């Protein structure tokens, strides 16, 4: 299995886990306000993690002597 397909599989798994977690929150017997608060917190945490990953990728890219990330297109699903 190539490195790109492993990364794609990992991202697909994480996306599925996020969708499942969101669905679980929506089907819990909580009030709307509580669910919205939980979803907001989860969104904030996910954005913080994503920003950290982007920052790390940019640092690795610069460390390797390239200022731009090599992107061939087509493998981005977001």
Image (spheres, helix red, strand yellow):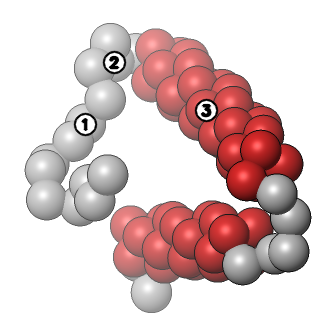
Between 27 and 8, which is closer to the camera in this rendering?
27
Q: Residue at x 69, y 38 (%)?
A: 40
Relative image position of residue 26 (x, y in whole percent): 68, 69
Query: Does label 3 or label 1 sit earlier along the sequence?
Result: 3
Which residue lies most toward the front here?
Answer: 31
Mark 1 and mark 2 in contact (Cβ < 8 Å)? yes
Q: Residue at x 33, y 18 (%)?
A: 66
- Name the disc covering residue 66, or none: 2
Mark 3–mark 1 Cα distance, whole angstroms, equals 23 Å
Describe residue 68's horizontal placement relative to residue 1 as left or right: left
Circle 3 or circle 1, nearest the eye: 3
- Decide: is 17 above or below 1: above
- Decide: is 35 above or below 40: below
Which residue is identified by label 1?
A: 70
Mark 2–mark 1 Cα distance, whole angstroms, equals 9 Å
Relative image position of residue 71 (x, y in whole percent): 21, 42
């Amino acid at each position: 299995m190539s490195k790109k397909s492993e990364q794609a599989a990992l991202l697909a798994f994480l996306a599925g886990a996020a969708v499942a977690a969101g669905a679980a929150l929506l089907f819990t017997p909580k009030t709307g306000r509580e669910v919205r608060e939980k979803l907001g917190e989860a969104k904030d945490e996910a954005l913080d993690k994503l920003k950290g990953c982007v920052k790390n990728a940019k640092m690795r890219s610069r460390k390797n002597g390239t200022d731009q990330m090599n992107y061939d297109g087509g493998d981005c699903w977001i």
